[in-house]
Amino acid sequence: MKTRVITAVIALLLFIPVLIFHNTYIFTVVIALLSAVAVYEMCSCIGAKLPLRIVGVIIGTAIPVASDIKIIGELASSIIIHTVLPLTILTVAIIVMCYMLRPVNKFIPMYITALLYPSTGFGLIVYYNRFHPYTLIFLMFFIVSWVTDSFAMITGKYFGKHKLCPTLSPKKTIEGSIGGTMATVIAFLIYGFITDIPVLESVFLGFLLSLASQAGDLLASAIKRIYVIKDYGKIFPGHGGVMDRFDSVIGVSLVFNAFYIISILI
């Protein structure tokens, strides 16, 4: 526990300058590096050879950079981002299919998933940070994940009696999930009040994205169970790798992208 706390404090201190300079290329560079590491971790998890991992690092770096509208232009960036949703849905479907059909040779679909799933999620964070559909939206992706995770853990510790998904995450409870979701809705109401988002929209987004955060966490856990590993990496002592820490953030960014595209179409 002590190691986890120390690592969390150090990571927060290192991330503060990134948040301060979020309108600069520093933010894009940091997110691109996180994406590259996350893709490398997933490639390692599925047993990809070194050349394929290197390809993954290149793609993991390229997609967040290509999502920055100040680098390649708004039109090009929008085309990239607004065509990734079908690909993301496809990769999630592949993950579920492979989990259900364990005996089937699944390297190729899982490799595609390892390349696209984390890099797309991080790319969306860069894109919406630059695009600004909401004020300081980049904070929202992280706040949802952290609030949901923290309050789910606290609520589950004191009130948890019913397992949420014991096969994938034995410590998670239904009560914890509800507590994390309620806390996120409240956090979103505060965020909406500060940034002038309507109350109903704040409640809906808080609820939706909290569920997305938990789904992203469980999805990453499902892959670890398939390949029988405890953590994706060791870059954060006591916490694991980038995918272990940012799996829920990726889920939030992907679902928000779907919400935003649908809201535009409606």
Image (cartoon, rainbow, N blue to C red):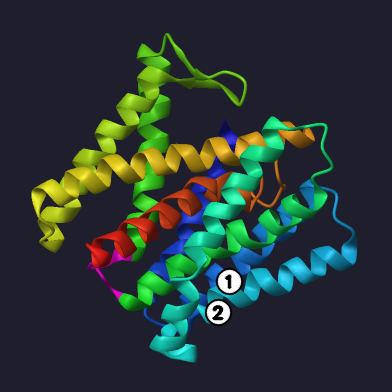
Residue at the spot of label 2: 65
Based on the picture, tell me whether residue 133 belongs to the magenta stretch: yes
Kind of residue at disc 1: Ala
Residue 81: tell me if it is visible: yes
Q: Is residue 163 left or right of residue 32?
A: left
- Provide the residue span drawn in magenta: 132-137
Image height of 65 relative to 34, above or below: below
What is the total number of numbered labels drawn onto the structure image?
2
**Which numbered disc, 2 or 1, marks the residue that appears first in the sequence?**
1
Disc on res. 164: none
- Specify the quadrant that holds the N terminus: top right
In the picture, residue 130 is in which quadrant?
Answer: bottom left
Q: Residue furthest toward the top?
A: 161
Disc on res. 32: 1
Q: Is residue 130 left or right of residue 89?
A: left
Residue 175 lies, in percent from the top left, at 36, 18
Q: Secondary structure at mark 1?
A: helix
Whole-Å distance between the Cαs marked 2 and 1? 6 Å
Residue 56 lies, in percent from the top left, at 74, 66
Around disc 1, counting alpha carbons within 10 Å, would you say few (fewer than 14), some (14 to 19), or many (20 or more)? many
Residue at image location 19% in from the left, 39% down from the top: 186
Q: Secondary structure at mark 2?
A: helix
The residue closer to the viewer here, 49 or 137, is 49
Around disc 2, counting alpha carbons within 10 Å, would you say few (fewer than 14), some (14 to 19), or many (20 or more)? many
2 and 1 marks in contact (CB < 8 Å): yes
Image height of 113 relative to 64, above or below: above
Kind of residue at disc 2: Val
Residue 62 lies, in percent from the top left, at 63, 77
Residue 151 lies, in percent from the top left, at 35, 31
Based on the picture, tell me whether residue 164 belongs to the magenta stretch: no
